[in-house]
Image: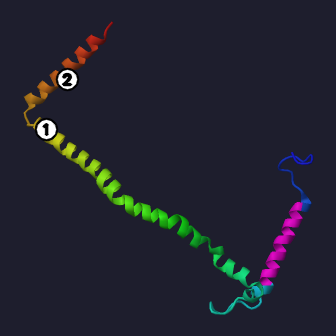
Amino acid sequence: MLHGLEPGEFILWVALGSLTIALLGILVAWLVYGRKPLASPKTADPLAKPLGSVYRGMERKWWVDEFYRAVLLRPADWLAEKLAGPVDQGGIDSLVNGFGSLTRSLAGLLRQLQNGFVRFYALAIVFGVVAIVLALILQMP
């Protein structure tokens, strides 16, 4: 609580002050740009001369993009390039290829069990039922 005010309480003078500042900003922008809009991108901005280096800094976004590229992106790109071969191709690809080979080998073994004889499938079901019954018997106290 600030100075006895409840959170979320509407304060008229703050709202009117904010509205006044916003409207003054719109008026100033219209006075600078609205009466005679820039005819082409090559037309000099009316604020370029009076603001000088401040305008240049704002136009270049205070060189934040260049800083971000130099400090974060270039090192990350370099690291990714250096690790792509050993980690991705050496580790991850080998692991994935290994699982693929294991699956192919297991499928070759299981393929032999599917011979098309119904009596073989019936025998497999009998073995499964016997295994389940044995498991249940062994778990009894």
Q: Nearer the viewer, residue 66 or 139?
A: 66
Q: Nearer the viewer, residue 122 or 79?
A: 79
Is residue 19 found inside the magenta-colored segment of the image? yes
Looking at the image, residue 105 lies above or below residue 123: below
Q: Main secondary structure of the magenta part?
A: helix
Q: Which residues are magenta?
A: 14-30
Quarter occupied by residue 25? bottom right
Label 2: state its secondary structure: helix
Looking at the image, residue 45 lies above or below residue 95: below
Q: Which residue is mark 1?
A: 109
Point out the residue furthest to the top here.
Answer: 141
Labels 2 and 1: the sequence-earlier one: 1
Q: Which residue is mark 2?
A: 128
What's the residue type where badge 2 is placed?
Gly
Q: Nearer the viewer, residue 128 or 118?
A: 128
Local crowd size for mark 2, using a 10 Å CA cut-off: few (<14), some (14–19), many (≥20): few
